Amino acid sequence: MRAAKANKNVVDSANVIAAIKRGVAYLLKQENLNASGKSPFWEHGIIAGGIPISSSPVDNRNRQRPPRNIRGRRRFKKPPPRRKPPKVNKAKTVPANQYGGETALVVESLLDVEQSLRLPDISQFAPVMAKPIKFLTKLKPGTTYVASFQANAMTLLPNKPIYRRTLLQDFRYLLDDIHASGGYFYGFEPNYPNPHNGLWDNSNSQYGVLGMWACAHQGLEVPFRYWELAGRHWRETQSMSGTWEYNKSVRGRTMTFGPAGVASLLICDEFLQRGAGSLSSADQNVIRGLKWIDANFPTDVSRMSLYAMYGYERVQLASGLQQFGGVDCYKALAARLLKTQKADGSWNIPFPQSSPIICTAYALLVLDRGLNPVIMSKLQYTPAYYGQWNARQRDVANFASWITQTFEAPVNWQVVSSNAPMSQWLNAPIVFISGSRDPKFTPEQIQKLTDYVDNGGMVFCSCNAQSAAFKQAMIKYGQEVVHNQYEAHVLSKKSFLYTMQPWYHPTVSGEYLGISNGVRYVWIISDQDLGAQWQAHRFNNRDAFEVPANLYLYAIGNGSPADRLHSLFIPPAHGAMRRQISINRLQYTGNWNPEPGAWPRMGRLAARNFSTGVTVKTVTADALSQAAPLTTLTGTHSFTLPPAQVNALRKYLNSGGMLFADAAGGHPTFSNGMTQLVKALYPKAVLQNIPMTDSLVTGNFPGGVAIAKVQYRKFYVSQLGMKTTPDLLGVKQGNRWVIVFSPVDVTSGFLGTNTWGILGYAPASAQSIARNVMMYALAHKR
């Protein structure tokens, strides 16, 4: 029977990455490496708009500089020389030559892809990239677009003097180019009588702000007054409906400039509300803009241009919101792009002055940036966007940006609503909760947090203004989530939270509380106001960034995080199953169920991956069902079963049942308890190594797979060295194994997480071992 042909239009990681690679190949084919030619690299001589000039000569020596109150201080000793003004032309406008802009946009998109996917063909050192990058370092920007694209490209390169000088040049241009009204036009108007009160449009205005944002994130000191002026422009030009037009006279392009306005305001607010001690106020213009987007995105997504798509994704990445009008923004944009990509790898969803090259560059930015891993979700526990949960809108966003720059790996963040599906929650390994008072979670919200933790997630809480009330509430809710089985405790200096980066030694301790299930931390509380430090870019307070970074590294197992479309959520399978198996989960006095979501998730994996329906029932040893051929046992500490339960378990095993046990987290004390249990069950038997030639390992039975070669977690390798064979022990009665025991963790692997600190198998290997155990039990069922 032939396997079904894969649908290239399905929005999943494989299809999106394949589309990105085809787009990259197309752009490289279009490149003209003859730098001295008339149209080098990706230049095709775009002339967009016109720059107004005076009808009579103006003395350029006295041309107006930027308004005095926005010039501010700049962090460089020798600013780039001022551009020489062009010769006076008596025409009313001169064409705005966008020379260099196409190449800058393409270089930005390719560098962005290279940082995410690590494609050697587009490394900055490859000739196809090195030459256009060198071209850009010599390019003098002549328009707002060129300066913006050039600045954004430079931020993706190392912090070397040659790239820094180019960025400073763009910074100077954009600072000089802003009008007194806060808007931008195509370029600086050197001969216009009052250049800073000239024409504007919201296309140039959004790219002016975007370029300056790139400069600011590279450490250039942008005057506060700049953000005030730019923000004022967008507030004053917003329509009553909440959207924006191209300019005062060109109407009807709200689909494009609605997201442009919201994204620009969110950028301005990032710097206008950076005070470490202050809580952000609600921006009514942003609220109206988001309301307009919610109302229009679901219908506009099927007909918007790539220019507009890029704007919507910028809103998503800046706001953290995943859905607009109930539609997943990234998945909707990706679905359209997968469907419209041409056979040669290009896109051509046109807009004014566009080309397949420009469209393809925009498409790569949309697909690649949205695909980057989501490291942290910010919990929206009240309906309003500017509620207590979001008192500092840019806290998590700035932390994610710092992670990107510090670890040289692009990452995203997101907002997750309390009522969002678990698939969205599980996009990120950490959920961040902040506030200054008890949020008074409902039972439904507590259950959602419980489900998230049970499925492998971790919750991180920060107290705004060091609120004691919020701290006590988080302790209470954390213990409710773990059913009051585990208590919050102060984390010691030896905790992984302080030691994940061995080269960094935090100066603080005792400021973090943790709740552990015995295998991993599931709930962390900081009594410090981390959001204030993140919002204000207080990078000199290293502990406020490095300690949470340790938590992130702990959550991903000090490895590479999965991209946005690799959710840990496994939906239930539909259709008839090839086989069914019932499993007993053995309950005893002790920590018998540290990972409540592990076996339910393994059951869903079994249904989807090898067509096996799994029914799991929790029982004590004296209530074991013989109808279930397999019983599982796990824990984190030593344990003892009462004699009556030992006898009941022995009877179950002798009647055809099988026991599969593992030490959750790889704790040796559980192994001690297991050794004593085997001795009580079969006094003359000992746990023996299961041979690599045994059918349990070779998978020589229906539904089995070969597990002679396995992968262990990075933490296991760091502690015990490299190993590729499974560590399985057992007790055999007759021709079958009645007990199979793994002294290293298997259970945690069912969750699909790579949490640090666990001595166990990597998730895929753990799931294969469980598969063989289940299929072996079925094959030997009496």
Image: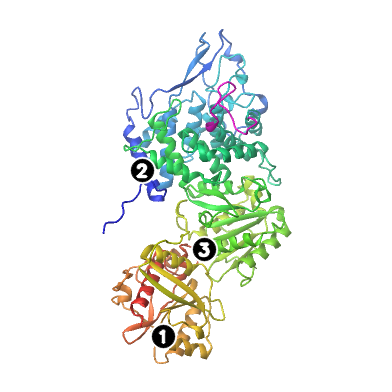
Report how far apart the C-alphas of labels 3 and 2 lie in the structure. Answer: 33 Å
Where residue 116 appears, as percent x and y from the top left, is 43, 46
Residue at the left extreme of this rendering: 1
- How dense is the environment of label 1, judged by Cα within 10 Å: few (below 14), some, or many (20 and up)? many
What secondary structure predominates along the stretch shown in magenta? loop
Q: Residue at x 32, y 30 (%)?
A: 33
- How dense is the environment of label 2, judged by Cα within 10 Å: few (below 14), some, or many (20 and up)? some
In the rendered image, residue 250 lying in the magenta stretch gets the answer: yes
358 or 323, which lies in front? 323
- Which dot marks residue 653? 1
Residue 31 in which image quadrant: top left
In the rendered image, residue 356 lying in the magenta stretch gets the answer: no
Where residue 43 appears, as percent x and y from the top left, is 38, 26
Q: Secondary structure at mark 3?
A: loop
Q: Which residues are magenta?
A: 239-256
Report how far apart the C-alphas of labels 1 and 2 lie in the structure. Answer: 54 Å
* Residue 490 can be seen in this image: no
When the figure is inspected, residue 62 is found, relative to residue 3, above or below; the finding is: above
Which numbered disc, 1 or 2, marks the residue that appears first in the sequence?
2
Report how far apart the C-alphas of labels 3 and 1 lie in the structure. Answer: 31 Å
- Which dot marks residue 455? 3
**Disc 2 target residue:** 21
The amino acid at mark 2 is Lys
The amino acid at mark 1 is Leu
**Of marks 1 and 2, the one in the foreground:** 1
* Residue 658 can be seen in this image: yes
The amino acid at mark 3 is Asn
Where residue 770 appears, as percent x and y from the top left, is 40, 71
Residue 1 in which image quadrant: bottom left
127 or 39, which lies in front? 39
Q: Secondary structure at mark 1?
A: helix
**Of marks 3 and 1, the one in the foreground:** 1
